[in-house]
Image (cartoon, coloured by chain):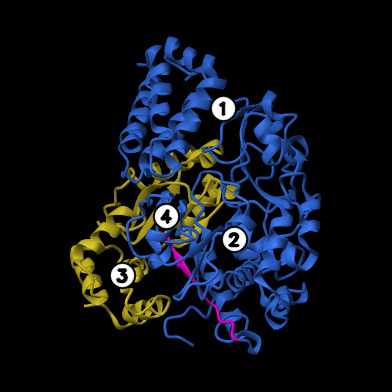
């Protein structure tokens, strides 16, 4: 069952659209549920579909199309690092290598303690701060160096 | 206050860390000289919302406003460069239902990050620009669609919306008139294609972001099938200044055919990457100098002037170019969204193209066969070259596949995917040939 907090937030998003266009809120409803539960299970998608009164397939189409929805568990902290051209030119490869060595995982893998997952992101629209990463689809860290990455990991307890 | 609304976020985004305001002409980022740039208080102090109040209370005619925008020579800042005043004149004047206004803040093309600074440092000017557009076009509801990856900036913008509404600049019967306008923030969640306006509209409706056939254009069939005007963030944000100073003053800031200022997002191998707002027509060399020049004392090798959907330029091509629509077109590329990616002489163009081609392969929405299959084909062939297994005929194959994507898809993203391949091979062919012959890069030897 969707939590009271999630329903309040989804109801707020619904105020942005005409009353008969509940499907429009599916992008934010999925985000809200994923933020609370860590990832989107089949059951989560069904609950979103029921709440918005739209077919399950309409929810699944959206959840599978947009990269930031996670259809598998991603651990406590999902670290998405951009490797696109502007980041690559400022040596995001070195940051990726450091993260992989330090965490002992490759892209799309979760550490055995379930704490970290590493994802390769596409352009995040913040290339002036390259190289950069985002934690849990929310907090962006820019101008990364190896030392800065260590400090970030240290904070994520 | 609506339950669930974000009210705790304050609008005190820190100023940019790297860029130097000297030498810039701040218009869409005019709040940047102030202590607390994103706040309503700051914007009011700068004369904010005065133009909205004037046109609404004095009942200024929509046609007069559109005339000012046409005179200003403002062209769409999202990359296509379509004249904004002309676009506005496509919206039906008389329509019984709800008309919509949409702002495209979905920056996902590599090197593009200008609109992010508008929503986090000067959100109220965008809100005023959209409200003026809504008044002019008779739109009752507006959406600003924001790139999902910049979540902290989305929060800042949504907080600014609540601030504006509480102060009476959004909502019902503004300034006691019969003009009402509701504006909302909505978001993407990791799909480059949603920067295409009809894909963006599909996404607002809660669907996969797959572009629609045009025509019909959004002006007749947009959000929920209603007439909709879509502009880029920087375009809307220019509007209050144009109404305050007149269309001619905006045009005079720039050069013929390119009015006003332009935000250039400069990334890659420069000392001070970031956004720089300058007058249209600034020489490339001056803009590069503002960004601190090439880093580490190295030499300039190549520039992608407007995002990867614009053709890459060699140092020789770009060094005497001016940064405006005609200037870059004459020099062999285009202005695009002003997303300038700078590469120094240590850059391997083959590996760079491999990364770009992966991006287009990953982000193709899959709707049109030439793009869905072609981008994967291109990526596999370039990967083969980088793996040391390339054949000389691969270069013709890449050109052929790219030419068969370009112009054969529903949206312009097909062309965008083809442009880097065609221009990289055209301007840096010897590097590709060397890679194929030697199985390693001419530049880094690896």
Please determine if labels 3 and 4 lie on a single subunit. Answer: no
Q: Which residues are magenta?
A: B178-188
Q: Residue at x 33, y 29 (%)?
A: B377
Determine contact: label 3, label 4, CB under 8 Å: no
Q: Where is mark 3, residue-wise?
A: A23
Q: Which residue in the structure is indicated by mark 4?
A: B216
Alpha-carbon neighbours of circle 3 within 10 Å: few (<14), some, or many (≥20)? many
Q: Which chain is yellow?
A: A
Name the one closer to the observer, B289 or B211: B211
User: Residue B213 vs residue A149: left or right?
Assistant: left
Q: Chain of mark 1?
A: B
Residue at 58% x, 71% y is B134
Residue B219 coordinates in the image, percent (x, y):
49, 60
**Would residue B150 appear left or right of A53 to someone viewing this image?**
right
Q: Residue at x 29, y 48 (%)?
A: A109
Q: Is residue B186 magenta?
A: yes
Q: Determine if marks 3 and 1 fall on one subunit.
A: no
Q: Which residue is mark 2?
A: B89
> Which residue is label 1 attached to?
B347
Please name the color used to draw chain B: blue
The answer to whether residue B19 is visible is no
* In contact (CB < 8 Å): disc 4 and disc 2: no
């Amino acid at each position: 069952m969707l939590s009271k907090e999630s329903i309040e937030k989804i109801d707020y998003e619904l105020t942005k659209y005409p009353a008969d266009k509940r499907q429009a809120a599916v992008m934010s409803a999925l985000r809200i549920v994923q933020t609370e539960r860590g990832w989107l299970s089949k059951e989560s998608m069904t609950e979103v579909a029921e709440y918005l009164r739209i077919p399950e397939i309409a929810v699944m189409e959206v959840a599978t199309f947009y990269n930031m929805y996670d259809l598998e568990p991603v651990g406590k902290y999902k670290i998405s690092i951009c490797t696109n051209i502007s980041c690559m030119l400022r040596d995001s490869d070195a940051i990726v290598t450091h993260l992989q060595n330090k965490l002992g995982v490759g892209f799309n893998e979760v550490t055995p303690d379930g704490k970290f997952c590493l994802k390769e992101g596409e352009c995040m629209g913040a290339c002036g701060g390259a190289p950069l990463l985002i934690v849990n689809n929310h907090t962006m860290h820019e101008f990364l160096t190896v030392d800065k990455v260590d400090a970030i990991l240290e904070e994520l307890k | 206050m609506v339950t669930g609304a974000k009210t705790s976020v304050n609008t005190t985004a820190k100023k940019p860390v790297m860029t130097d305001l000297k030498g810039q002409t701040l218009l869409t980022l005019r709040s940047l000289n102030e202590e607390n740039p994103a706040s309503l208080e700051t914007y009011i102090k700068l004369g904010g919302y005065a133009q909205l109040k004037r046109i609404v209370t004095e009942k200024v005619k929509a046609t007069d406003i559109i005339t000012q925008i046409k005179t200003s020579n403002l062209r769409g800042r999202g990359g296509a460069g379509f004249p904004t005043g002309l676009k506005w004149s496509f919206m039906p004047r008389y329509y019984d239902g709800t008309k919509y206004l949409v702002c495209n803040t979905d920056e996902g093309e590599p090197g593009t990050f200008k609109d992010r600074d508008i929503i986090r440092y000067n959100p109220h000017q965008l809100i005023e620009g959209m409200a003026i557009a809504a008044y002019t076009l008779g739109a009752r509801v507006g959406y600003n669609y924001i790139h999902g990856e910049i979540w902290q900036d989305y929060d800042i913008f949504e907080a600014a919306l609540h601030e504006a509404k509480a102060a009476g600049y959004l909502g019902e019967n503004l300034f006691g008139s019969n003009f009402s306008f509701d504006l909302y923030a909505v978001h993407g969640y990791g799909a480059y294609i949603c920067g295409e306006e009809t894909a963006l509209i599909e996404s607002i409706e809660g669907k996969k972001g797959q572009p629609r056939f045009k025509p019909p254009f959004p002006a007749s069939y947009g959000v929920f099938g209603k007439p909709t005007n879509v502009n880029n963030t920087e375009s809307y944000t220019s509007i209050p200044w144009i109404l305050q100073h007149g269309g001619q003053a905006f045009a005079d800031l720039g050069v013929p055919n390119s009015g006003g200022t332009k935000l250039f997002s400069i990334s890659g191998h420069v000392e001070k990457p970031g956004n720089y707002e300058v007058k249209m027509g600034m020489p490339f060399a001056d803009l590069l100098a503002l960004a601190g020049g090439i880093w580490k004392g190295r030499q300039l090798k190549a520039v992608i002037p407007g995002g990867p959907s614009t053709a890459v330029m060699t140092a020789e091509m770009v060094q005497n170019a001016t940064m405006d629509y005609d200037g870059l077109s004459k020099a062999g590329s285009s202005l695009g969204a002003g997303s300038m990616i700078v590469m120094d002489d240590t850059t391997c163009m083959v590996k760079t193209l491999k990364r770009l081609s992966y991006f287009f392969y990953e982000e193709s929405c899959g709707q049109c066969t030439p793009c869905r299959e072609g981008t994967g084909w291109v990526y596999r062939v370039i990967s083969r070259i980088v793996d040391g297994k390339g054949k000389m005929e691969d270069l013709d194959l890449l050109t052929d596949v790219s030419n068969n994507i370009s112009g054969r898809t529903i949206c312009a993203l097909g062309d965008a995917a083809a442009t880097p391949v065609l221009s990289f091979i055209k301007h840096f062919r010897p590097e590709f040939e060397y890679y194929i012959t030697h199985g390693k890069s001419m530049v880094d030897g690896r």
